[in-house]
Image (tube, rainbow, N blue to C red):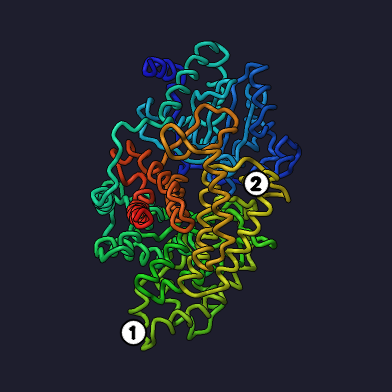
């Protein structure tokens, strides 16, 4: 039936070519000029939504006003989902949403809704899955991405869409203006037919997001762990670290993928697994030396555009840096290295300096662009570096960071290690620690100069989930490295979350911006916040943190638990009704809420002597059996919980036996 409907779709929109978010043929974007118009987004607090408040597009935030208007006027919806540090989101805003001709078409024929995906990950998941379904039915090899541009029926069911579109027709690609006009014409001509297509598309999306019942529970044993590691090793890039490299697709971006690294850490921490150790340390070494790491200012960019970690996509996300702080700290405990210490110290310094609010909470992200130029803030010219440094400093910095070679990005330099630090130290007859110290003194001069540049946009909203990951990173690093100040910084952020993002009923909110907490918290907000608080308990032994975590876990179970199949839904039981209530346990750039919740439950069960939490942890893992049967690598951080669960269950059984005696 869907294939038949898709034939109809193709007949009406056959010329549409959909482009991914990394489309490289866009015209050079131009900065916004005057701001003659103000739309409803001006009343929002999200920095991303506020960026669009003066578009001539008559934007609505997601909510009853917009949805009721679409139904009442029987107009299709144009839904645009993005986030503040998304480069191509900004490009499309400048090219299309500031274009008065395009705006006039959108305003006349559609109800236009703009969503910050970081505030509403539930909507992002549903409509990103809708785009994936659409591409699959179209037989397209294109994937998803941001900006997410979807056209919906008046009752918000998916019709068609893409990601980034150029504003006008370009070679063999339709521009956004043409796409909008074609969708309008198709809807105006046969609205009933297109409504049926939307109904069927929604049903298909609902089916893909629904949780399949567990027919055969997965055995939680060593075999599952070994299968996951084998799958991971099959994707491992032995030369440059990381996962997913393919000789057939050498331009495939490479992400840090912290859940994979957490799985490897678990394998190494619980035994002498040399294969896991090699994959872990190789990846961390190569990332630490590559351009994905900001060697001047600290922290990591979102991902590398190449196999070698050389050229990053320049935005910086709090959730990446929080996870990587935990990973590097745990790796340092396994095999101490001066370079890992440098990564940790620089990362914490970056977060303190650029991502921390006056109240001690953590901001969400830094943009990738400055003045419409991606990476401009982070690039260097050789002559400028030479002017800023002494001849002796440049003698070390130049060859160490590749400045004596040809420029590596648009006639400028992204600083990155061109040779191992140990080799540079040996050649200069100093220790690695001394070399790092001397380099840091020189890099601090560059940082001071860079601080005088126009900064990229900072997304200053505070997300409970991302703050939880950074709290966990600081507490973990502080505990392992015996840096009390790291733990204290994490505790200050936790106090902010527990005071400012908790309502009168003790329920978490998702976001804090403009002096107010907003939006219902999702599973990730609870799970990651609890994980951060438990890391503080592990670092300090303070029972207060244990009690706070237990209180939040009780609320999470009450509102998110799937009593039929086990595990947790992504949205609470009183959330607004959408196309689907999803429960997908896959780990991605961040671990799934179910993966983190399983670990939280095991910790709490042992610390509070609550065996009922172990039962829920087991059900949470087993509920993912269909996914784990298909691909255990889809949820490596969930699999990583298995050894701790089995050990805790054995201890609980032993304790119960002793009490019986």
Residue closer to the observer: 317 or 166: 317
Q: Position of residue 207 (x, y in %)?
A: 41, 26
Query: Do tag 1 and tag 2 residues touch (Cβ < 8 Å)?
Result: no
Q: Which mark is residue 506?
A: 2
The residue positioned farthest toward the bottom in the image shown? 429
From the viewer's perspective, is the residue at label 1 or at label 2 nearer? 2
Provide residue 415's location: percent of width, then percent of height.
46, 68
Nearest the camera: 549 or 146? 549
Residue name at image x 37 percent, y 64 percent: 284
Quadrant in the picture for residue 360: bottom right
Q: Secondary structure at mark 1?
A: helix
Q: Is residue 377 above or below residue 252?
A: below
Quadrant the N terminus occupies: top left
Residue 87 in view, yes or no: no
Quarter that holds the C terminus: bottom left
* Mark 2 crowd level (few <14, some 14–19, many ≥20, 10 Å Cα): few
Vertical comparison of 533 with 216: above or below: below
Look at the picture and state if 65 lies above or below 611.
Answer: above
> Can you identify the residue that label 1 sits on?
426
From the viewer's perspective, is 248 left or right of 127?
left
Instruction: Name the residue rendered at 31%, 31% in the picture.
Output: 215
Closest to the observer: 657 or 281? Answer: 657
Q: CA distance from mark 1 to mark 2?
A: 57 Å
The residue lying toward the viewer, choosing from 171 and 223, is 223
Q: Pinpoint residue 190: horizontal percent, then vertical percent.
A: 53, 11
Residue found at x 52% / y 63%: 537
Kindly state the secondary structure of the residue where label 2 is placed: loop
Is residue 23 at least partly visible in the picture?
A: yes
Left or right: residue 528 compared with residue 46: left
Residue 308, label in figure: none
Residue 446 appears in which quarter of the rendering? bottom right
């Amino acid at each position: 039936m869907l294939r038949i409907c898709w034939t109809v779709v193709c007949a009406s929109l056959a010329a549409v070519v959909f482009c991914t978010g990394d489309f490289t043929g866009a015209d050079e974007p131009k900065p916004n000029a005057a701001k003659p118009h103000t739309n409803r987004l001006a009343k929002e607090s999200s920095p991303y939504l506020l960026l669009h408040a003066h578009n001539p597009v008559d934007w609505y935030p997601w909510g009853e006003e917009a949805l009721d208007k679409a139904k009442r006027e029987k107009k299709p919806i144009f839904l645009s989902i993005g986030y503040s540090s998304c480069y191509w989101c900004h490009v499309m805003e400048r090219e299309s949403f500031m274009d008065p001709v395009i705006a006039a078409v959108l305003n006349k024929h559609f109800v236009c809704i703009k969503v910050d995906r970081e505030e509403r990950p539930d909507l992002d998941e549903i409509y990103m899955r809708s785009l994936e379904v659409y591409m699959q039915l179209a037989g397209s090899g294109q994937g998803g991405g941001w900006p997410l541009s979807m056209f919906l029926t008046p009752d918000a069911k998916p019709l068609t869409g893409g990601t980034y579109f150029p504003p006008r027709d370009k070679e063999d690609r339709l521009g956004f203006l043409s796409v909008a006009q074609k969708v309008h014409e198709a809807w105006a001509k046969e609205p009933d037919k297109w409504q049926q297509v939307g109904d069927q598309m929604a049903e298909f999306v609902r089916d893909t997001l629904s949780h399949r019942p567990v027919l055969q529970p997965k055995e939680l044993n060593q075999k599952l762990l070994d299968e996951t590691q084998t799958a991971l090793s099959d994707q491992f890039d032995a030369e440059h670290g990381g996962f997913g490299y393919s000789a057939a697709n050498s331009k495939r971006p490479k992400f840090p993928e912290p859940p994979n690294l957490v799985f490897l850490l678990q394998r190494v921490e619980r035994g002498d697994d040399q294969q896991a150790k090699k994959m872990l340390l190789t990846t961390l070494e190569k990332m630490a030396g590559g351009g994905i790491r900001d060697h001047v200012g600290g922290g990591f960019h979102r991902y590398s555009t190449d196999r070698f970690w050389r050229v990053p996509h320049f935005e910086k996300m709090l959730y990446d840096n929080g996870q990587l702080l935990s990973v590097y700290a745990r790796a340092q405990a396994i095999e101490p290295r001066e370079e890992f210490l440098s990564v940790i110290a620089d990362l914490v310094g970056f977060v303190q300096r650029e991502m921390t609010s006056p109240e001690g909470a953590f901001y969400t992200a830094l943009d990738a662009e400055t003045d419409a130029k991606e990476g401009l803030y982070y690039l260097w010219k050789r002559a400028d570096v030479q002017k800023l440094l002494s001849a002796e400093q440049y003698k070390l910095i130049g060859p160490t960071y590749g400045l004596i070679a040809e420029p590596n990005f648009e006639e400028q330099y992204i600083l990155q290690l061109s040779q191992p630090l140990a080799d540079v130290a040996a050649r200069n007859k100093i220790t690695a620690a001394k070399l790092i110290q001397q380099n840091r003194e020189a890099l601090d001069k560059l940082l001071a100069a860079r601080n005088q540049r126009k900064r990229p946009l900072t997304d200053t909203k505070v997300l409970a989930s991302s703050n939880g990951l950074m709290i966990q990173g600081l507490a973990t690093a502080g505990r392992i490295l015996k840096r009390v100040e790291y733990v204290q910084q994490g505790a200050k952020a936790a106090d902010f979350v527990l005071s400012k993002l908790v309502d009168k009923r003790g329920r978490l909110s998702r976001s804090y911006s403009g002096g107010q907490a907003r939006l219902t918290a999702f599973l990730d907000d609870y799970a990651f916040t609890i994980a951060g608080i438990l890391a503080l308990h592990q670092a300090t032994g303070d029972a207060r943190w244990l009690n706070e975590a237990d209180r939040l876990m009780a609320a999470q179970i009450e509102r998110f638990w799937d009593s039929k199949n086990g595990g947790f839904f992504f949205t609470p039981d009183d959330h607004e009704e959408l196309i689907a209530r999803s429960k997908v346990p896959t780990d991605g750039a961040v671990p799934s809420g179910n993966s983190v919740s399983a670990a939280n439950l095991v910790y709490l069960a042992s610390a509070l002597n609550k065996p009922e939490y172990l039962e829920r942890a087991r059900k949470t893992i087993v509920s993912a059996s269909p996914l784990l049967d298909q691909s255990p690598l889809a949820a490596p951080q969930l699999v990583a919980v298995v050894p701790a669960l089995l050990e805790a269950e054995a201890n609980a059984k032993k304790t119960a036996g002793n009490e019986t005696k």
